[in-house]
Image (cartoon, rainbow, N blue to C red):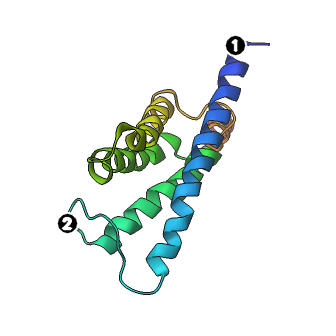
Amino acid sequence: MKTNLWNDLALLVIRLGAGGMMLTHGIPKIGRLFGEGPVKFADPFGLGPEVSLGLAIFAEVICAILVMVGFKTRLATIPLIFTMLTAAFYAHWNDPFGRKELPLLYICVFIGILAFGAGKYAVDHFMKKKVADCATFFLSLD
């Protein structure tokens, strides 16, 4: 087998694993946003706990799904990295290293995805191929 095949499969597994595990943190937060009573969530940027929680949900659910399917993957990793930096260095600043370890690990994984992209088995790849095929078709009409 080609090395590129293994690289693309590895990127797929990493995307699915990291995105899927991130969903386990984001989906429960949806209930906190729409639950009864006032929202209790860290507000590191002074936007209010509701907005901060909404941004965390956006990153941990929407962006995680985008990473999993490989759509706008590099762009989707940026809110995830930012959210995990906030988790590690604001929400868990006074906690022992064991509590910071998971967000730091996510940061490493999402930086890798940001650097290497989604790979061949992603919506981004199929869309790029489709656009290239359309351009080739229209250029051949001359």
What residue is shown with label 1?
3
Q: Is residue 75 above or below residue 91?
A: above
Residue placed farthest to the front in the image? 96
Horizontally, is 113 left or right of 2 in the view? left
Q: Circle 2 sits on which residue?
A: 46
Say few, some or many: other residues with alpha carbon within 10 Å of mark 2 (under 14 / 14 to 19 / 20 or more): few
Q: Residue furthest left?
A: 46
Q: Residues within 10 Å of mark 1 (few under 14, many from 20)?
A: few
Q: Relative to 83, is 1 above or below? A: above
Quarter holding the C terminus is: top right
Residue 104 screen position, x and y as percent: 40, 37
Tell me the mark number nearer the camera, choosing from 2 and 1: 2
Residue at 26% over, 64% down: 43
The residue lying toward the viewer, choosing from 71 and 18, is: 18
The amino acid pointed to by label 1 is: Thr
Q: What is the three-letter code of the residue carrying label 2?
A: Gly
Q: Element type at marker 2?
A: loop
Query: Split into 4 quadrants, where in the image is the N terminus?
Result: top right
Q: SS for tag 1?
A: helix
On the image, the x and y values in percent for residue 20 come to: 62, 49
View extreme (right): residue:
1
